[in-house]
Amino acid sequence: MNTQMRLAISTKERLAIGLRFLATGCTYSDLQFVFRVSVSSISRIVPEVCDQIVKTPRDYV
């Protein structure tokens, strides 16, 4: 959600964070510096991305 303090993390960036984690095995703190997103946000984003990948029909993956 966009607030006066900051913009929301876009869907593209959320997917990029999740895929980078899966592809490289980087720690959340490493991803924090690459994407400039807090570790607590990354710890919510990665499982969400994984859940959505699993739920995606196999024809598209």
Image (cartoon, rainbow, N blue to C red):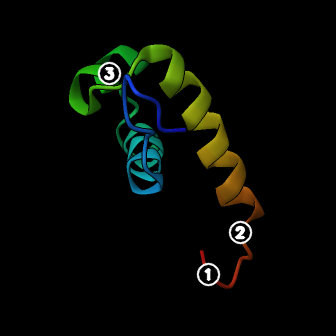
Mark 3 highlights which residue? 32
- Quadrant of the drawing holding the N terminus: top right
Q: Could you tell me how far apart the alpha carbons at marks 3 and 1 are, in whole angstroms?
A: 29 Å
Residue placed at 51% from the left, 24% from the top? 41
User: At label 1, which amino acid type do we have?
Assistant: Tyr
Q: Is residue 3 above or below residue 22?
A: above
Task: State the residue lying farthest toward the bottom.
Answer: 59
Residue placed at 46% from the left, 45% from the top? 14
Q: Could you tell me how far apart the alpha carbons at marks 2 and 3 are, in whole angstroms?
A: 26 Å
Q: Could you tell me how far apart the alpha carbons at marks 1 and 2 are, in whole angstroms?
A: 7 Å
Instruction: Residue 56: give its label.
Output: 2
Q: Nearer the viewer, mark 3 or mark 1?
A: 3
Q: Nearer the viewer, mark 2 or mark 3?
A: 3
Tell me whether circle 2 and circle 3 mark residues in contact (CB < 8 Å): no
Task: State the residue lying farthest toward the front.
Answer: 4
Residue placed at 40% from the left, 41% from the top? 17
- Quadrant of the drawing holding the C terminus: bottom right
Residue placed at 48% from the left, 54% from the top? 11
Q: SS at mark 2?
A: loop
Q: Earlier in the sequence, mark 2 or mark 3?
A: 3
Q: Is residue 31 above or below residue 29?
A: below
- Quarter location, residue 60: bottom right
Q: Earlier in the sequence, mark 3 or mark 1?
A: 3
Instruction: Residue 2: give its label.
Output: none
Q: Where does residue 2 sit, x and y in percent of width and height? A: 47, 38
Instruction: Residue 60: give its label.
Output: 1
User: At label 3, which amino acid type do we have?
Assistant: Gln
User: At label 2, which amino acid type do we have?
Assistant: Thr
